[in-house]
Image (cartoon, helix red, strand yellow):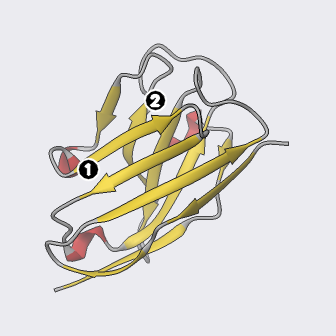
């Protein structure tokens, strides 16, 4: 059974940093597609960043240059390093995984099969 569990969320002031982690159990992530999504109150879930099986990455425009997605294949952990946080980054953050290989990052939630319960990030001004 594949399980994803996020951690690392919290409250931070604007301009601060947070590092989110997603521990995956049930399969190895080395050659799997994975991504981070977020959902703010009253809004639809949106992509933050994605990483392909090849290691190539992609980011939503508003996150480029501020966020970095990475995988630790040995520890089976997906991470999201976030810098220069803004109040509009406040949301529940979810990690997601596909069950197969992908040559390019997948940027839509319908393409992901497995989801974690989320971790809350709150950025105050």
Residue nearer the viewer, 14 or 77: 77
- Residue 9, compared with residue 80, is above or below; it is below
Q: Is residue 47 left or right of residue 118?
A: left
Secondary structure at numbered mark 1: strand
- Residue 40, compared with residue 48, is above or below; it is below
Q: Residues within 10 Å of mark 2 (few under 14, many from 20)?
A: many
Residue at 62% over, 30% down: 29
Quick one: quadrant of the C terminus? bottom left
Image position, residue 16 (x, y; %): 20, 72
Quick one: quadrant of the N terminus? top right
Q: CA distance from mark 1 to mark 2?
A: 17 Å
Image position, residue 70 (x, y; %): 40, 38
Q: Is mark 1 in CB contact (under 8 Å) with mark 2?
A: no
Q: Nearer the observer, disc 1 or disc 2?
A: 1
> Would you name the residue on which mark 2 appears?
106
Q: Where residue 89 is drawn, which disc sits there?
A: none
Q: Is residue 85 left or right of residue 95?
A: left
Image position, residue 15 (x, y; %): 14, 72
Image position, residue 39 (x, y; %): 45, 65
Q: Looking at the image, how many numbered discs can be counted on the residues?
A: 2
Outermost residue on the bottom side: it is 125
Residue nearer the viewer, 48 or 77: 77
> Would you name the residue on which mark 1 appears?
67
Residue at 16% over, 77% down: 14
Residue at 56% over, 44% down: 77
Q: Residues within 10 Å of mark 1 (few under 14, many from 20)?
A: many
Along the polypeptide, which appears first: circle 1 or circle 2? 1
Outermost residue on the front side: it is 74
Residue at 78% over, 42% down: 2
- Residue 83, compared with residue 71, is above or below; it is below
């Amino acid at each position: 059974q594949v399980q994803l569990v996020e951690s690392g969320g919290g409250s931070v002031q604007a301009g601060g940093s947070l590092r989110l982690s997603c521990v995956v159990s049930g399969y190895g992530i080395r050659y799997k597609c994975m991504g981070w999504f977020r959902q703010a109150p009253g809004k639809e879930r949106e992509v933050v960043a994605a990483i392909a099986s090849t290691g190539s990455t992609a980011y939503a425009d508003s996150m480029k240059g501020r966020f970095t997605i990475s995988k630790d294949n040995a520890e089976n952990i997906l991470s999201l390093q976030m810098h220069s946080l803004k109040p509009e980054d406040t949301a529940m953050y979810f990690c997601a995984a596909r069950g197969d290989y992908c040559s390019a990052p997948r940027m839509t939630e319908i393409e992901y099969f497995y989801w974690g319960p989320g971790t809350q990030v709150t950025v105050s001004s």
